[in-house]
Structures are given as C-alpha cells and as structure tokens.
Amino acid sequence: MVDYWKDFGPFHGRIWLDSASEGPLPRIAAERAAEAITWKVSPHLMTADLFGRIPRRLRHVLGRLIGAPEEQVILGNSATFGIHLLANGLPLRPGDEILLVRGDFPSDILPWLALEKTGVKIRFLEAKGTLPDGDDLKENLTPSTRLFCTSWVHSFSGTAADPLSLGKICASHRVLFVLNASHALGTRPLDVTEAGVDALTCVGYKWLCGPYGTGFCWIRPEVLDTLQYNHAYWQALLPRDYLLKEDEDLTPRGDVGARMYDVFGTANFLNFHPWTASLEYLLGIGIDRIEEHDQHLVDRLLAGLNRSLYEPLSPEAGRGRSALVVISHRDPKRNEEIHRILQREGIDIAFRRGRLRISPHLHNSESDIDRLLEVMNALHF
C-alpha cells in the first residue's frame, strides 16, 4: 500500500476520517495557497496573465477529471451552484414534473422546490433502497416527467447509484438526468460522455481535496443552449482587452459558451489556485488507484468491525458500496456517545441522522483504521 498520507498534514496527532465533510488539502495545494496569499499581500504580483491563467488551468484539469472538453466546464463554488443554474434556467412550464429522491441531500431538493410557485410539479421517488435502481426509476416516470435529479452516492447511507443504468432509462424517456457527484467524484472514475448524464455538479472541498467554497458543473451542450438564465459576468462576456480601450462597447463576445455561467470572480486566487494543485495531484496518482486505496481501507474497516457490537448500514459489496461507511451500534442510542468518545481519542468521524459515518480517503493509512477499530471494538457498555 502506497503511503500517500505522507503528502498530507500535519494532523497534530488526530485521525481525520471525515472526507465526506471536508477533504484535507495536500501539502502541494497548501503551498499554492500560500503563494496566492503573497500575490494579495503584494498586489503588483497579481498580473493580468494570472487573471486568465488561474481559471483556464482549473478548467483544464476538471475537464480531464470527467472526460469533457475544458470549454464545457462551468466553474462554481458548490454543488448547489450548478443545480441553481438548471433550476432557474431550464425552460420548464406549468405541469412539467421534476422527479427527486426522498431523503436525498438538501442541495438536490431545495432549488427545485422553489419552482412549485411557477406551476412546476415536484414529486418524490420512494426508492426500495436509499437510492433508486433502474426499476425504481422506470416505475416512477410519467409522461409529465421532464427531469430526474439524484446524488451519485447518498450522503446519509453511503449507498451508490448506477449512473449508467439511470442515464439510459432517462434518455429512453426523454427525461433530463442531473447527477450530484459530490460524494463519488475523486473516489471512482467517471466519463460524462459515457455516463449518460445531461448535467453533473460537484463540490470541490470533499473528495477532490480543495478549499471550501469550490465546485463546478458540466451541462451537456444541447441542454446548455436551452438555458434562459440572466447571468452576465463582464470578464466572461467582454473582449479580453476591454479595459485597454477608450470606447465603452458592451457587445458580448460570441464565443463564450459554458463560461457564460461561471461563478463571478473566476480568478479566485486563494481558492482556485490551490484546488488546481489538488486536482493535478489526484490525477497524477490516477483515480483508479485512488479508488483501490480507499476501498482497501473500507475492506479493512468492515473486516475488523465487531459485529456483535456494530451493524454496517451501508452496502458491503458491489457497485452500491462507496467510500462512505455508515454504521450503528446495536443500541442506536449509543451512537452519539461513541462519536464523542472517538473525538476525545483524537479520531474524527461524522455523526449524521443518529448514525456513525466513516469516510477514509487518500490521506489515511491502515494504521488509522486499526486505531479506529481498537477504540470502537473496546466499547462494551
């Protein structure tokens, strides 16, 4: 097992097993963040070249990550950013139906709910599992369904959906498929040209190890062209030499494409510069290898868990398994106390909806998992 953990930290004696909340910056990214701070301390270093180079380089690595042309990448600040573009920009009419998943993360739900006042119908799919499979989706589509939105990996259960099968069903019914990849991208590979999605949105600060306030989205060009969203950022729409001219011609450029919908302030030195370094680091290792690393740690955790004390609630095998492991004590009332004990022992995991959520990533080692198991398996109440 490669010691990727050496590229992270210091963690000051603590074990961070909550990448599903915040992925730590690799050291190379922290160095880039420090470099960006020097640019702001000494503003003469913030050249016109940097204002163009920072977003261009980030767009390039994100395109590599998802198998899309870089000019189709939209820079954002969250997963919600991309869903808001769609919810506020798609030409939906009264009577059109949006199909959502009951119990999904709020960012996949709230932007669509606001459309009810326009006459758009919001309906929730009740999956047999936490996330729907192909049969669940087919049973819930109606002639009025225009769009289906779901997470790739469910934040509260660790269950992974199968984007390919869901995408095929949506395509056959002419339903737009929107996928929130926030808890999967960075832990398993994806090519949007093969996955059957019409739009993908993702945060940057979890498994992609970027600073907080980073994210991006991709929208299939045919869908992007239908958006009717008033989003006019001058650095995207005006000629690059606008500030050098004496006239005030505000005629928008005609070659903007997806960049029209970038978050405002695309140079974003303090966030986008280190995030680019994180993505280059991850891509340098290879997402396939990262998946192997993460799943090896999940294997070790599940194999060492005392089943007389704890019950895994997330899938233990197959493609439904993810890098999020959700477990519960046999007496669920003990979970919050266990969470507090782990914190006191210097082990950070998440407590969500009364359950324990463990999410190891590249910065973790086998010894981190062994220490977690040592503490948890010794808790005989």
Image: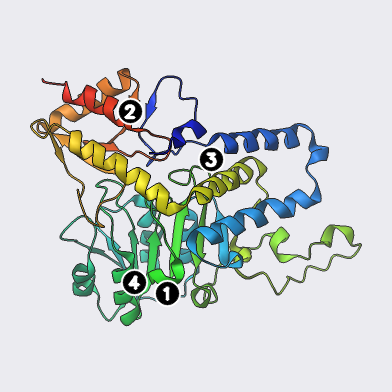
Q: Is residue 246 visible?
A: yes
The vertical placement of 292 against 128, above or below, is above
Q: Which residue is mark 2?
A: 367
Q: Amino acid at mark 2?
A: Ser
Q: Are marks 1 and 3 in contact (CB under 8 Å)?
A: no
Q: Point out the tag, 1 or 2, that comes first from the N-terminus.
A: 1
The vertical placement of 282 against 240, above or below, is above
Q: Residue at x 30, y 43 (%)?
A: 296
Q: Amino acid at mark 3?
A: Pro
Residue 100 horizontal/vertical position (percent)? 30, 63
Q: Residue furthest left?
A: 308
Q: Residue at x 29, y 37 (%)?
A: 358
Q: Which mark is residue 167?
A: 4
The vertical placement of 226 against 43, above or below, is below
Q: Residue at x 77, y 71 (%)?
A: 251
Q: Is residue 298 left or right of residue 203?
A: left
Query: What secondary structure is marked by label 1?
Result: loop
> Which of the two discs, 4 and 1, sits closer to the camera?
4
Query: What secondary structure is marked by label 2?
Result: helix
Q: Which residue is mark 3?
A: 211
> Which of the two discs, 1 and 3, sits closer to the camera?
3
Q: Point out the tag, 3 or 2, that comes first from the N-terminus.
A: 3
Q: Are marks 2 and 4 in contact (CB under 8 Å)?
A: no
Q: Point out the tag, 3 or 4, that comes first from the N-terminus.
A: 4
Within-10-Å neighbours for mark 2: few <14, some 14–19, many 20+: few
Q: Amino acid at mark 1?
A: Leu
* Disc 2 to disc 4, C-alpha distance: 39 Å
- Tell me the quadrant of the picture where the C terminus can be found: top left
Within-10-Å neighbours for mark 4: few <14, some 14–19, many 20+: many
